[in-house]
Image: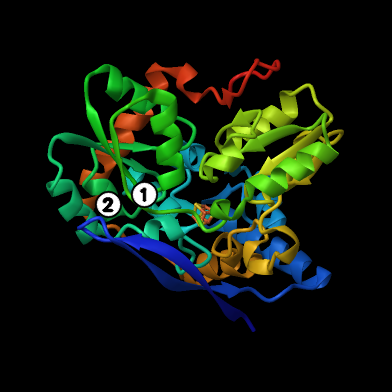
Amino acid sequence: MSTSTSYEYTRQDATGSSCTVQAWAKVPPALSGAQKTELIAKARALLESRNAVLVAHYYVDGDLQDLALATGGIVADSLEMARFGRDHAAQTLVVAGVRFMGESAKILSPEKRVLMPDLDATCSLDLGCPPDDFAAFCDAHPDRQVVVYANTSAAVKARADWMVTSSCALAIVKHLKDSGQKVLWAPDRHLGRYVQQETGADMLLWNGACIVHDEFKGTELELLKAQHPEAMVLVHPESPESVVALADVVGSTSQMLNAVVNGPAREYIVATDNLIMHRMRQLAPGKVLIEAPTAGNAASCKSCAHCPWMAMNGLQGVVDCLEHGHGEIQVEASLGRQAQACITRMLDFVKANPSALAPKVQGMVRGIGAA
Ligand code: SF4
């Protein structure tokens, strides 16, 4: 039996005011070794018989990541997940991640069936940016290019000029600034502030946050750094300013992974969802990985650096969606076409500017290649 836990997130309205709202996430039941073995075998057979491919995010359970890789799928960040799903020959995509990732897959591949292990797996950034309020906010600022982060609904993307991921946000906003454009940015306030500081662009920021990255603490990270003076600090830019300020590398999940694989250090302090370490350990087995601190000594499991909605993805959900067609993503066709425009603009930009995916390395460059 699964149970539910509630979480608080920030939601802005059309006027720019914000409030704190509660959302819930299911905690999936733990599986025995025998149950896992049986479900993995079943999922493998279903993926093959249904001409389906598993597209998994770095933050989902390690068993799902391994299943994706063992069956010809992918484990990736949201940008690569979207590209892979679009370009793969399979007619059914099983997206193990959160709802906006399934919607992005459907928007880019409207002719394919997109299934998710649990359609209730959401994201505090998506929840904190309601489409009607967002549209009204955009209408009030018609002189700005609307740039939205991938972590938004199809309806919010449909209102945007550009979509960005954390891999390419800096390069795209810099491009807009260099073209003389002002930006309306949504929804992550930390990533928006970081992009604003790095590019000097004129940006109006929506007030949203990721409930996982928002929990990382600068003071505790400084103490941890003092205990591991040789460690490189890798930080996702959805984290607070005090945490980003202590980073050696600021970048997306793929860029952080690349930093561990190619970086010169033996130890790495990692400030993002801790399940990324599953893939980091596989690709860089000799490196020592240390979780960045969240809420100090009083940390509760609500601040344990793992996304409760990513955790809703499980082997049982993969089997159920393939076997019974549960969890199919639907995006209304005209809305999908509108939303596709901003995603395609980003993909075209990245294709034309491969260096747009380079991570930000603070201070001197320490021999890390671009992602
Ligand atoms: S980790 Fe944060 S940004 Fe990612 S899906 Fe969870 S709540 Fe959203």
Question: Label 1, label 2: how many angstroms apart (C-alpha)?
Answer: 10 Å
In the structure shown, which secondary structural element does the residue marked by tag 2 occupy?
helix
Left/right of residue 229 with respect to residue 44 in the rendered view: right
Left/right of residue 365 with respect to residue 251 in the rendered view: right
Tell which circle, 1 or 2, labels the residue nearer the N-terminal end. Answer: 2
Residue 263 image point, x, y percent? 74, 24
Closer to the camera in the image, 253 or 96: 253
Label tally: 2
Of tags 1 and 2, which is closer to the observer?
Answer: 1
- At 33% from the left and 55% from the top, the residue drawn is 153
Residue placed under numbered mark 2 in the picture: 156
- At 87% from the left and 33% from the top, the residue drawn is 286
Residue placed under numbered mark 1 in the picture: 187
Asked if the residue at label 1 sits under 8 Å from ligand 1, the reply is no
Count residues near mark 2 (Cα–Cα under 10 Å), then give few for <14, some for 14-19, many for 20+: many
In the rendered view of the protein, which quadrant contains the N terminus? bottom right
Instruction: Identify the image's colour scheme: rainbow, by chain, secondary structure or one colour.
Output: rainbow
On screen, residue 256 above or below 353: below
Left/right of residue 110 with respect to residue 99 in the rendered view: left
Q: Write down the quadrant of residue 173 in the picture.
A: top left
- At 64% from the left and 33% from the top, the residue drawn is 247
Closer to the camera in the image, 179 or 354: 179
In the rendered view of the protein, which quadrant contains the C terminus? top right
On screen, residue 295 above or below 257: below
Residue 34 image point, x, y percent? 81, 71
- At 58% from the left and 32% from the top, the residue drawn is 250
- Is residue 171 something one can see in this rendering? no
Type of amino acid under label 1? Pro
Residue 292 image point, x, y percent? 71, 47
